Amino acid sequence: MTANFLLDRIVRKGLTLMKKVQHDKSKSDSVPIEVYKNRCLSYIERINELKYLKPEDIDDARKKLFNVYFYLQSVSGPERQTPHQTEVSIEIVSKALDKAVVDDYYKRTGGLGYTVTRGLTLTEEVGEPINHYYRKVKTRPVTTLSATNIKESEVTVKQTAKEWRDDMAKQKKEILNENKLSRLQSQRSNTTKPIPNV
């Protein structure tokens, strides 16, 4: 064999397929042969993707896997093809797998050696989710006020926007008039001063 661990591992997986066929024949008298053939072809494709190895090593591994494939083609007997034993390619389930990985990541929290897993019990997902950073304000019961309980000093009347604008315009006008009067008075006082003798 070669010194490359990955190449040896792929070839070992391919050779294991022959043992699996013999085991299936002895146990159930039927073999999911198409599944094994597809698996063997995927191993051959994986070897073809390895570009950094010696060509002699790749050719040797490819020959061994093709021998396994030819053996799988020559297997006779009933074929077992049930839905729960057929293989599904990783491309088909990649989105579901990504979502499962993300969900699993968010179920684990903590740090510095203290981790907590969430969602592992049946009761955790039941009910309204809890947000620890937001507390709902409890609503107070509505009370009715009678005219006898209210004093005039306790009542504050809110102005409408138009009333507020009118009030602001009135106050502004008063302040400007006061400023004008004070300026006029200061000018008058400046003009009535006696001129000093020279």
Image: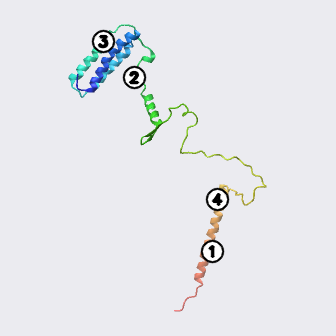
| Circle 3: element type | helix
- Percent across and percent down for residue 90 are 39, 25
Disc with the residue nearer the chain's start (3 vs 2): 3
Q: What's the mark number on residue 110?
A: none
Toward the viewer: 65 or 17? 17
- Percent across and percent down for residue 150 are 75, 56
Please state if 81 lies on the left or on the right of 14 as rendered. right
- Percent across and percent down for residue 121 are 52, 32
Q: What's the mark number on residue 89?
A: 2
Disc with the residue nearer the chain's start (1 vs 3): 3
Residue under numbered circle 1: 181
Q: What's the mark number on residue 165?
A: 4
Q: Residues within 10 Å of mark 3 (few under 14, many from 20)?
A: few
- Residue depicted at 63% across the width and 70% down the height: 177
Quadrant of residue 86 within the rendered picture: top left
Residues at circles 2 and 4 in contact by the CB criterion of under 8 Å:
no
- Between label 1 and label 2, give the one nearer the viewer: 2
Amino acid type of the residue that numbered disc 3 sits on in the rendered structure:
Tyr
- Between label 2 and label 4, give the one nearer the viewer: 2
Q: Residues within 10 Å of mark 1 (few under 14, many from 20)?
A: few
- Residue depicted at 64% across the width and 62% down the height: 168
Please state if 107 lies on the left or on the right of 49 as rendered. right
Disc with the residue nearer the chain's start (4 vs 1): 4
Residues at circles 1 and 3 in contact by the CB criterion of under 8 Å:
no
The answer to whether residue 25 is above or below residue 180 is: above
The answer to whether residue 154 is above or below residue 31 is: below
Residue under numbered circle 3: 71
